[in-house]
Image (cartoon, rainbow, N blue to C red):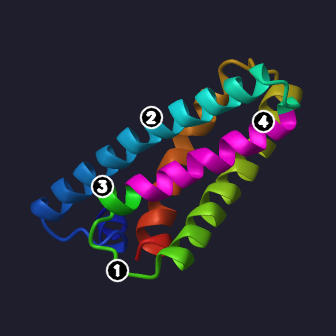
Amino acid sequence: MKKLFTLLGIKTRDDFAAFIKQFFKFGVVGLSNTAVFLGSYYALLYLGMFYVLANIMGFALSVLNAFFWSRRFVFTESDKSPGRQLLKVYSSYGFTFLLSLGTLMIMVEVLGVSEVIAPLINMCYTVPLNFILNKFWAFR
């Protein structure tokens, strides 16, 4: 565990508390991302858009939301170019999206996990992975 803390830059209890607080803020932003995604997805479906395109648009809007709030609320010490950060945020979320899609298909089609439960299992690793990618790469 000590090696993990060192890797994450956690040296003191205050560092640990700050890390947990930042992760919690990231979770709050994640809830707003979910609302943006679902709201835009269902609105676009209602307007007659093909569900795959509505899914892509919902994803794009939710990641833009994630970037905006992460930059202002979660990773406020960031001072890099917003354009470069935005590209990195889309890359990290895109990576975990594709990873979760693959594991979702394996869980449902091969392992017989319920399609209702499988996305919840995926969130157990995609949320921390997105946090790590954003903290140590996109907003570094």
Q: CA distance from mark 1 to mark 4?
A: 33 Å
The numbered mark, 3 or 2, whose residue comes first in the sequence reads: 2
Which disc is residue 31 wearing? 2
Dot 4 alpha-carbon crowd within 10 angstroms: few under 14, some 14 to 19, many 20 or more: many
Residue type, mark 2 in image: Leu
Q: Nearer the viewer, mark 2 or mark 4?
A: 4
Question: How many numbered badges does the structure rendering display?
Answer: 4
- Mark drawn on residue 79: 1
Instruction: Residue 25: give x, y in percent of width and height.
Output: 31, 47
The magenta span reads 52-69
Label 2 or label 1, whichever comes before in sequence order? 2
The image quarter in which residue 123 lies: top right
Residue labelled with disc 3: 73
User: Three-letter amino acid code at disc 1?
Assistant: Asp
Residue 124 drawn above or below residue 111: below
Image location of residue 73, percent across then percent down: 30, 55
